[in-house]
Structure formats: C-alpha cells, structure tokens
Amino acid sequence: MDVTLPSKQASRQAHPQRTLLVLASDFPGAPEAVDGYAVQAAEGWAELAERVRTAAPSSVAVVRVEAGGDAEEMRGLMRRTPSVPVIAAVSFRQAGAAQVGALLAAGIAEIVNLDMLPVLAGMVPTLRRAHARPLKRRLEAGLPVLVPEEARTLLRAAAETVVDRGGRPRFAGIFGVYVRTVAIKSRELNLPPPRRLLAWVRVLLALSLLEEAERTVINVAHVCGYRDNSSLKRAIENFTGTPALTSIRDQSFAAAFDRFAGELRDLRLGTHSRGAAARP
Amino acid sequence: MSPVRHRSRAELPSSPIEFAYPIAVPDGTVFGTVIVQEVPHTFALQVFQALRMTMAWAAGPEASGIEFDTMNLTEWELEVLQTKGVDEALWAPVAVIAGELTRPAMLEPERLSHACLAVMDWALGADAHGTALLFAEAAAVVWPSNARLAWICGKAHRERHDFARAETWLRRAKRVAVWTGDWEMQSLAINSLGNIRMWMGDLEAARELLLQAGRIAKARRLRERHAKVLHDLFLVCIYSGEWKEAERYAEQAFAAYGPDHPNITALTFDLALLATHQGQFARALEVLNQLRDQFTDDDRRLRVYAMIGRAAGAAGDAETFQSAWTESWALIDGNTVDHLRADAALELGLGAIGLGFRDHAIHALVIAKEAAEELGERDTLQNAESALGKLEYHEAAAVAARNRPAVRTRAAELAAKYILVVQAPTGGNAAN
C-alpha cells in the first residue's frame, strides 16, 4: 500500500553523518549507533548543551521529559540552538494531554511516547520525521502565498538535502527520480533550477545558524558544507547581493529570505531571467 | 467503471513528487498537534497516537517497520478499549484503528480507511476541523488507490479555504482516477479543480478545466456529471460577464438535469445571481422570493437571504430588505455558516447602500471586511473596502456641501444668467 518508491527509501536510510544526541542517564546502555545514527551520550546537561552548540543541523537530540516537569533545560536547549531538532520522549500515560500539548506548543521537533516506544531503535522513524524540521519551519513561515503546495514539497526536500550536505542526486533521490525530472518539475512549478535552489537553501541555512551566538563562523561554514570562512562569505554575498562590510554576521536571514522570496515571485510572474535554468 | 488503460501492474501511477506529501516529505508541523488542542483531553492522546500510527503504517514497512516491531501495541489497544466516558462515535473507530494496527500483518486497508473516515465524521460534528482534515488525509494514504478518498481530502481542505493543499489532493485524485479507469471520479476531480480556480479568480483556467471535465462526462455519457459541469460553466460565465454564454449554459444545464432534479433549485438561485450581476434587481428579487423557503440548510438559506437583501436594496424595497436583514444576521450570528460571513455581510451592506441606510451599510461592510481578512477572501475584501471608501467619500462630500458658505459658483452664475436669457421675450437672440 506504500505510495513511495523503493529507491527513495534506500536514499533515506543512508545518512551516515547524522548524530543522535542523548543524555546517558535518559537511555542507559544506549547502543553506539542505531540505523545510521551515531549515538552520543552526554553525562549531563552541560555536556549535552555543549555538544548541541556545535552539532551539525542534521543531528537530533532526544530528551526524556518527566511527567509534571516544566522541561526547562530542554526549552533552554531549543532557545540557544534552534537549528538542531529536539525530540521530547515522554510517557503519555503519566504526562497527560495538557503536558503533551504544552511540549508541542513549546516548539519541539517531534514527540515519542515512551509507553509504546521505550527503546532508541524504535524511535528511528520519528528521528527521520524530525530531520531538518527547524529549517523547514523557517522557510515555510516566510514563503509567499503564491508558492503552490508541490513547490513547497520540493523546498522541504531541498531543506532535507542541504541539512544532510547533499547535492542534486540526493535531492532527486528523496523522490526516487532522476535529477532531470526534478529540474523539469522545478521549472513547471516556477522554482529555480535544483542547483540554484539547493545553493539558496544552503545560504539560508548558514544565515540561520549564524544567528546562534555561540556558533563560530568556521563551525557554520563546515556544518553547511563550505570549505572555509571565505567560501561561506562569498556565497552569502553572491546570493544576498550585499557585501558584509565588517562581519559576516551583519547579514540577516530575513533580508536574504526576502531576496529569495522575490526571486520566487519573479519566476512566477515571468520577470526573472532563468539563465542556465534549463540546465538541471 | 471503464477498463483500466495502463499496462503497468503497479497499484498507483509513478508520480512520486505529487504523492510525496504528507508521508515521504513531511512538513514543519508535528503531525497531529491540532488533535491535542481539539479533542477532549481524556481521549486526545489515544486519538493522536491512532493518527500517527496509521500514518506510520501507510509509510510502509521499509520506513516504519522497526517502529511496529518494537512497539507495545497490545497495551495501547487495551488502553483504548478500557477508556470510558468518551463519545462512542469517536471511541469506536479509534478502537477499530487500534485493533487493526495491533495486528499489522492482517490489517485491511479498507477497514482502517473507513475507521479514519468515521473519526473524521465525528470531528466534523464536534467542530474539530483540524482533526477532521488529518483523518481524511490518513484515510486517503492508507487506501491510496481510492481516488474518492483523495477527492474528499481536497474538498475538506477547500472548505477550510486551504486552496493550495486542496489542489494537491484533487490533482492526486485525478491521477489515481485516470490510473484506475474511474471516469466519473476523473471528471469530478477536474470539475473541483476548476471550481477552485474559479474561487481564486482565475476564470480562464477554470473554464479550461471545466470544459475538460465536461468533455469526459459527455464522452462517457455521465449525464448528471455533465449537467453539473454545465452548471459550473454557467457560473464562470456570470463572473466573467459573458451573459449570453451564461444563459446558453444555463439552458443546457437545465436540459441535462431534467425538471425533477434537486439541483434545479440551485440553478434557479444562480439565475437570480445572473440577474443581479446584470443589474436587473427587480427580476432577481422576484426569483429569490420564490426560493425563500426552498432551502433547509443554513448555508443556502443565508445565501438566499443575503442576496434578497442586496436585490431589495437596489430595487428600493425597504420592507423586504429589512426582513432579509433580520433573517441573515440571525443565521450569521448562529455561527453555523462561518465561511459565508464575509460574503453575506457584503451583500447586505451593498443592499443597505442602495436604500441609503448608512448605519446598516457601515455595520455590514465593516464586518464583511474583517471577516474577509480573516478568511483570506481577497475579492470580498476588495469589494468591502471599495464600498466603505465610497460611503466615506459621499459622506465627506455631503458634509463639505453642508458646511460650504453660500457662495455662488461661476457655473451657478452662468446658469442663472442663461435662465434669465431664456425667460426673456427675445429668446436666444438676446444671447448674441
């Protein structure tokens, strides 16, 4: 009954760079790896926060939340490093609907019911659903209304690809199609060609990471797949069209996103020259 | 149903980008969040769990098999069965879902899908619209070869004014219907896509889609379907101002429906709409007065009353306007026709302007404007703002005229001079 293609499933399961961050006390005896995720167990909140601070956005943190607790540490983690998805593992039976509702409202990337899924291995499909969710949320929040739903699906897939530092083959692999097919679809939906779309999303990811005060510029460059600071700076300047006069942190996500949205609008209205758009 | 045209044995067409939402590429929201807000807390988490498990099953064993292998499903089923004090219309289908998912190897997609539809049905009755949408989607993804379920999702999204997502589901319904050789569904899905385009104001695209739906219906001799398409083409022509074409489609729709068809009343109402657009308010009022008691559902009753208000206002019939005004607001305030509150208020406001009922007009137009903003109805918003602007302009002009000192303008002086000339016994010669 599955509507997805086998090749897509295969591409989804190959994600060697992803890291699963947990507290050792939450999951005693956690394995070193679960289905493509390298598990890193921190000894305490300070260590977990430090790891999340420098973690790639493809990482995911799973935090156990006690029934009745306010999950303040988890909220702090999400506030300081919003680019890394945080999954709340909670016993639904003990917590109740009100607490689950509060956790969902707090902005967690996913939730796991520990009554049903007590072990990390069973949580892998949930980890995959949470993948790139913070970036998807930022992109979706500002997209112009004229962007159709299928174009949004392509953008979400682009976000998943970029967060995994993937390229066009991986992007097409999410749908189980050839790169050329995605290029044709992008054109039909008035999106930039896949290469440019991925480059745009990579720049937006970098800018969102630069907003996190505790990340260094070189860390952002590396986790986004740029060679060094200058490659990152050049890419941002190329896409935003404004040079960073003093620091690269002067560039804002909002301004860059406006430019991206403007490009989407121009493509929709046919006022933007595609240039090499025909080439995937 | 006609024989299937494709040669592939696959259950579905290969269009993975169109079919990627909601499973293959999930969006930014945690699936099912709205359930925790809408469903009574005593049972919300069981419903939340049921939806997420259904979606996980639909994703297939490669994506979520490990979840099912490690999950304590029997305990969950027991918990659902032991829950007390929940509306049976919700509890029973969730129990069926739990029962099916606990034995995934023996699961029957049709039964699971029907249970999801039953939850949707409960949710609609309980004003839990977000939950209803989610379970409609769940029903469609667990039984993906059923085009009608995808169409139901499209309709449900359209009702909530989420046209982008509605289009996605309707396109999916069309693709699946083509694949399975379900001509009626194919025509219906294209018809619904055309209607969405019409509501979005893209009348050219709407006409193309409706003509396509009509061709399919005609070729397959789906008489009733064809009549409905002609009816919708009639509406497109009204909105695009092609009166002659509109009348032609109305005649064809009437012939295709036949005199005893229940949609004849709706067609008559649309004829009144045509008369209103043509500015023939007295004729529209005559037809609408005949329709006053024909409809029993609040939706169509409100449409009739609001349009009576508009036509009566324009025709100068204050008494009829007043009764339509009272009836309409009773329905709007009843909150059962929330989606019409912008449109209906605009019609009433325009009617009030016609009669010079300034306070009535401002009251209705301000409500129409606010509701249109909330519902994202750009046309209605624009019309309400324009009507309010005109009211303000006329009011300002009237105030200015009242406050202006009695100075004779040059035009007035000239007019007075000419009157004197005309009245003079020498007539026109005096002017020379």
Image (cartoon, coloured by chain):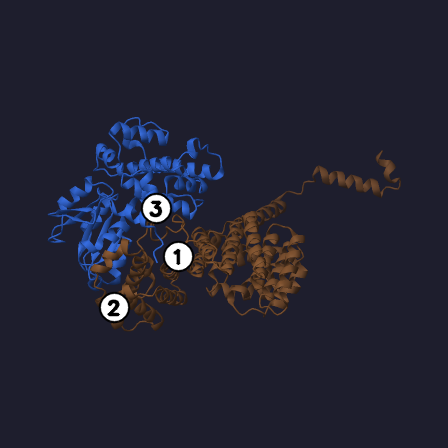
Chain colours: A blue, B brown
Q: Is residue B405 above or below residue B333?
A: above
Residue holding disc 2: B77
Residue displayed at 24% across by 29% down: A228
Residue holding disc 3: A176
Q: Is residue B51 above or below residue B293?
A: above
Residue holding disc 1: B11
At mark 2, the secondary structure is helix
Q: CA distance from mark 3 to mark 1?
A: 17 Å
Q: Position of residue B100 (x, y in %)?
A: 30, 67
Going by the picture, which residue comes out furthest to the right?
B426
Question: From where the camera sits, is residue B76 visible?
Answer: yes
Q: CA distance from mark 2 to mark 1?
A: 30 Å
Q: Are marks 2 and 3 in contact (CB under 8 Å)?
A: no
Query: B143 or A256: which is nearer to us?
Result: B143
Query: A171 or B122: which is nearer to us?
Result: A171
Question: From where the camera sits, is residue B358 visible?
Answer: no
Residue displayed at 19% across by 39% down: A54
Residue displayed at 87% across by 36% down: B429
Q: CA distance from mark 2 to mark 3?
A: 35 Å
Chain of residue at mark 1 = B
Q: Quadrant of the C terminus of chain A?
A: top left
